[in-house]
Amino acid sequence: MNWNACETTAAALASIQEHTRGIRYELIVVDNGTTRDDSARELPKRFPSMTFIANPRNLGFSVANNQGIARATGRYVVLLNNDTVQTGDALTAAVRYMDAHQDVGALGILHCNADAARSRQPSAYRFPRPWRELLSLVGLRHNPEDASPAAVDTERDVDWVCGSFLLVRRRCLDEIGPLDERFFIYDEDIDWCRRAWTAGWKVRFWPGASMIHLGAAARPFMKDKTFVHFRSHLSYFRKHHGSLPAALYYSIMVGRLTTATLWQVARWMTGAAPFSHVRERSMRQKQFALLRHGRAGG
């Protein structure tokens, strides 16, 4: 998916073409209503062999990826972030691995940072556990276990792997369906992997192939990343754990924002902060409480 990141996406596509040699593949790019550069013209011109889908506005990560999935024809589908760079033939290696492990429905690979040492980046995790997260939000638990990444140098079955590289077997995809479009962005990969496990498929992390993940290509254009993540996490809790933990999560987050707003009011009344800070905090609190912001992405 591309959104206001023509050069980043072009670099990702060029790296695929440069390094992928052992398999036949198709490239599908979905542009999610770019307005800040000339992606819709430049990307098809630079990569004429790819399939390009242009949306009139930002429909969200899940919708855009599902559009690409619907057009894909291969026996595997890989969801690949546009802020990734291939440094070797990771796609071929991953396909060969999946060919040899028929019980694996989805595969994640090693993510590296773009520093000189190619330091390793977590990309596989345990499922969120709502009660531990709730305790963490109220300060009764630090570094909840479910937020801990799986070991980055060990081949193993994991709860979920990041959607920045999610290689999915077609049979698994056909069985459990595409991404849940209730998740505008964030947590859609957790939800999909959970559905795969429920259907009897394995989700595996394999460090035998790697790539660079730059991270957060679209973040500069998102008005409130925290809100978008909050809304998706709330949807995840409600879908998989019921209304009670979702309601508690919502209440605690809104309560924390209310406290922050009151603190800004106190600072304004004592002359320590301008009224614009109060207005900004109160507006953010209202957006969180009404769950009305973020669907347009930016």
Image (spheres, helix red, strand yellow):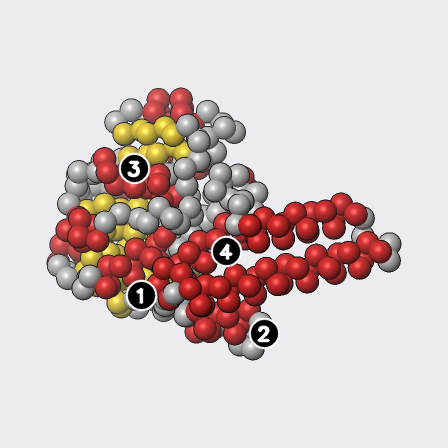
N-term mark: 3 or 4: 3
Q: Is disc 3 placed on a helix, strand or loop?
A: helix
- Say if mark 1 contacts mark 4, CB within 8 Å: no
- The residue at which mark 3 appears reads as 67
CA distance separating discs 1 and 4 = 21 Å
**Mark 2 and mark 1: span between their CA atoms?**
26 Å
Marks 3/2 in contact by CB < 8 Å: the verdict is no
Q: Residues within 10 Å of mark 4 (few under 14, many from 20)?
A: some
Q: Disc 4 marks which residue? A: 230
Please tell me whether mark 1 sits on a helix, a strand or a loop.
loop
- The residue that mark 1 highlights is 159
Count numbered badges in the picture: 4
Separation (CA) of disc 3 from disc 4:
24 Å
Q: Amino acid at mark 3?
A: Gln
- For disc 2, the marked residue is 139
Q: Residue furthest bottom?
A: 140
How crowded pointer 1 is (Cα within 10 Å; few <14, some 14-19, many 20+) is rated as many
User: x and y percent of residue 94 in the render?
Assistant: 22, 53
| Residue 179 seen | yes
Element class at badge 2:
loop
Instruction: Name the amino acid, label 4.
Output: Phe
Residue 124: x and y in percent read 35, 62
Q: Quadrant of the N terminus?
A: top left
Q: Label 3, label 1: how many angstroms apart (C-alpha)? A: 25 Å
Amino acid type, residue under disc 1 in the picture: Asp
- Tell which circle, 3 or 2, labels the residue nearer the N-terminal end: 3
